Image (cartoon, grey):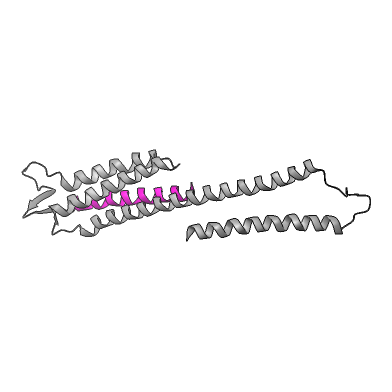
């Protein structure tokens, strides 16, 4: 489909240049301006120069179109990855409740988020977008979220923020608020990266 579209664009561009060239030729023959005279014969060197310029313009425009299409495709791929990462983070938020969440589910979702983030960093390396902002913002937030959700402290006199009961992690209300706040920070970070990807 893309190849067919590019083929039609190429034919259209060539046809447009030929029409412009022919139109210019006939306008030069038909229109006469007082005080301006045109040579009846074209110097072969000038003719070669015109045709070389003509084909250079076509070649450069094709290269620019190809580069533009490739860049657009890379950015779309990046946006799709960021959208998937956002969905993974939102799944953590929706599964969070007072009754607790299965430990296996928590570790699986956190692993998905980490793997997706790694894929995005690798994509940043391949395309011309600065990855440093994403790495410095997202990676520490992901680590903090993982610690909030999985680090069970030593049993103490006070209520533990995380308890492990029958394969479920049960969070205190305060810990749930901390986790929700961290998830919102992660979502903001992803949204900022999406905006930067679109604007670059």
Residue located 65% across and 45% down the image = 56
Most frequent secondary structure within the magenta stretch: helix
User: Relative to residue 12, is residue 163 depicted above or below?
Assistant: above
In terms of depth relative to the viewer, which is nearer, 142 or 46? 46
- What residue is drawn where x is 8% and y is 51%? 164
Q: Residue furthest front?
A: 44
Q: Is residue 199 magenta?
A: yes
Q: Is residue 178 visible?
A: no
Q: Is residue 34 left or right of residue 153?
A: right
Residue 46: x %, y % from top left: 78, 43
Residue 42 within the segment the image draws in magenta? no
Q: Position of residue 104 (x, y in %)?
A: 14, 53
In the image, taking residue 9 as reference, residue 74 lies left or right, namely left
User: In the drawing, does residue 151 fall left or right of residue 187?
Assistant: left
Tell me where the magenta segment starts and ends, as one range.
Answer: 172-200
* Displayed quadrant of residue 21: bottom right
Q: Tell me if I can see residue 180 in this picture.
A: yes
Q: Nearer the viewer, residue 26 or 44?
A: 44
Q: Position of residue 62 (x, y in %)?
A: 58, 49
């Amino acid at each position: 489909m893309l190849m067919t579209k590019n083929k039609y664009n190429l034919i259209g561009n060539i046809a447009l240049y030929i029409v412009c060239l022919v139109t210019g030729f006939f306008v030069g023959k038909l229109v006469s301006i007082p005080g301006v005279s045109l040579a009846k014969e074209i110097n072969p060197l000038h003719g070669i120069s015109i045709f070389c310029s003509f084909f250079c313009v076509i070649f450069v425009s094709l290269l620019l179109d190809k580069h533009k299409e490739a860049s657009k495709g890379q950015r779309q791929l990046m946006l799709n990855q960021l959208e998937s990462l956002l969905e993974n983070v939102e799944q953590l938020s929706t599964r969070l409740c007072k009754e607790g969440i299965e430990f296996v589910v928590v570790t699986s979702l956190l692993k998905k988020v980490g793997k997706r983030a790694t894929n995005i960093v690798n994509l940043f390396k391949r395309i011309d977008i600065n990855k440093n902002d994403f790495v410095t913002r997202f990676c520490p937030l992901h680590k903090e979220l993982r610690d909030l959700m999985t680090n069970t402290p030593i049993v103490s006199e006070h209520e533990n923020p995380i308890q492990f009961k029958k394969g479920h992690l049960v969070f205190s209300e305060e810990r749930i608020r901390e986790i929700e706040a961290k998830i919102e920070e992660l979502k903001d970070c992803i949204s900022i990266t999406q905006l930067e990807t679109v604007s670059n």
